[in-house]
Amino acid sequence: MILKILLVLALLVAAVLLFAATRPATFRVERSIAIAAPAGALFPRLNDLHQVHEWSPWKEKDPNATYTFEGPAAGVGASQSWSGNSAVGAGKQTIVESRQNELVRLKLEFLKPMEGVCDATFTLRPEGGATRVTWTMAGENNFLGKVFCLFVNQDKMIGGEFEKGLATLKRTSESALAKTN
C-alpha cells in the first residue's frame, strides 16, 4: 500500500515538473495610471532613486529595511541596494537608460528570496492634460520560476504592488502640484 502511495506521489510530482517545463520562459507585468501633472514634474520622481524610494510600495512592507545609494544622484548609473525582511528581500536596482520626461529603464538584480535579473521601465506619455505613467517589469523565468508561477499568479502579485505604488505616486504628485498652484 505504501509503495502505491509513493508511486502516485512520484507521478504527481513528475506531472507538475513536466507541466512547469511547458510554461513560458519569459514574463511581463505592466500597469499604468494617468496623473494630472506634466511629465516634467513626474520625471524627477522616477529618475532619482531617492525619490522612487519615497513612493515605492515596498517601503511600507518593511519600514526597517536598509537602503544604500551609489553613483550619481539621478539618471544613468544611479543605483540603490536594499536588504529587508522576507517581503522585500535583498537586491539592487540601477538606472541603465534615462530620456528626459519620457523613459527611465532599470536593471533589477534580486538576491533574496530568489536570485534573478530583470528589467523595469517607467514610460511617460502625454494624455490630454495629464501624463500616463506606465510601469513595466519583464524578464526570464528559469525552471524554479516556472514552478513558482504554477502556484502564485505573478501578474497579480507584482501588478498589485505596481498599482499601489502608482496610486501613491499619483496622490503625492497631484498633491504637491496643487500646493504650488
Image (cartoon, rainbow, N blue to C red):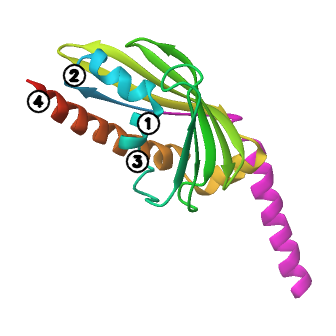
Asked if residue 165 is positioned above or below residue 122 in the image, the reply reads below
Label 3 is placed on what type of residue?
A: Pro
Which SS does the magenta portion mostly show? helix
Query: Which of the numbered marks, if any, corresponds to residue 50?
Result: 1
* Measured Cα–Cα span from mark 3 to mark 4: 23 Å
Q: Are marks 3 and 2 in contact (CB under 8 Å)?
A: no
Q: Nearer the viewer, residue 3 or 99?
A: 99
> For numbered disc 2, what is the local secondary structure?
loop
* Measured Cα–Cα span from mark 3 to mark 2: 20 Å
Asked if residue 17 is positioned above or below residue 5 in the image, the reply reads above
Within 10 angstroms of label 1, few (less than 14), some, or many (20 or more) residues?
some
Label 4 is placed on what type of residue?
A: Ala
Mark toward the start of the polypeptide (3 vs 2): 2
Quadrant housing residue 86: bottom right
Which portion, as a residue range, is magenta?
1-29
Query: Quadrant location of the C terminus?
Result: top left
Residue 171 located left or right of residue 19 = left
Label 1 is placed on what type of residue?
A: His
Residue plotted at (11% across, 29% down)? 178
Residue 119 located left or right of residue 158 = right
Residue 113 in the image, given as x and y percentages of width and height: 66, 56
Within 10 angstroms of label 3, few (less than 14), some, or many (20 or more) residues?
many
| Residue ID for mark 2 | 37
